[in-house]
Amino acid sequence: MTVHELFPYLCVRDTAQAIAFYCDVFGATEKFRLNEPGGRIGHAELQFGPMTLMLCDEYPEYDIRQPDPAAGTSVTLHVHVDNADAIIERALAAGGTLLMPAKDQFYGERSGVFRDPFGHRWNVGHSIEEVTTEEMQRRYDGIDEPC
């Protein structure tokens, strides 16, 4: 068996609003959406560079819900961009919540973290240096509070 692709698929309370947020913040483009007669969006796809992000509205009748921002989440979407600081600024201006300001990290990236208005956690970074696995481990061993 061969895996050909892996798509993140996010549930949000308002897919139309989420599409606008992700297009504004990340410069994503909408590929398409499937609307139910009652207005719910059953499926939408956004293009993030060469990657696809799938979205849908909540379906409580199938236990499909967006994360509860008060409870945190076990999932983080890690996105590499040209300028992490600029993307995080745009996310905050569009209603995101800062969880960790952008800073230079031990693993050779400048990155920070925000939560979008729909409860999803985004780690946004850009490369600042190439770091070997051994050097990364050495640096990791010497820090008090890992990310």
Image (tube, helix red, strand yellow):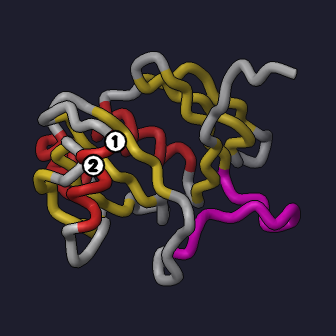
Magenta part of the chain: 57-68
Marks 2 and 1 sit apart, C-alpha to C-alpha, by 5 Å
Q: Percent position (x, y) of residue 144?
A: 22, 77
For mark 1, what is the residue?
A: 133
Residue type at numbered disc 1: Thr
For mark 1, give the secondary structure: helix
Residue 95 visible in the shown view? no
**Is 12 positioned to the left or the right of 144 in the image?**
right
Residue type at numbered disc 2: Met
111 vs 60, nearest the viewer: 111
- Residue drawn at 46 percent across, 48 percent down: 77
In the rendered structure, find residue 14 and report the number of the disc placed on it: none
Q: Percent position (x, y) of residue 98?
A: 24, 66
Label 2 with label 1: CB-CB less than 8 Å: yes
- Residue drawn at 61 percent across, 49 percent down: 10
In the rendered structure, find residue 136 and report the number of the disc placed on it: 2
**Is 134 positioned to the left or the right of 111 in the image?**
right
Relative to residue 137, is residue 49 depicted above or below? above
User: Dividing the image into 4 quarters, which one contains the N terminus?
Assistant: top right
- Residue drawn at 55 percent across, 54 percent down: 14
Quadrant of the rendered image containing residue 7: top right
Residue 63 part of the magenta segment: yes
Q: Percent position (x, y) of residue 147?
A: 31, 66
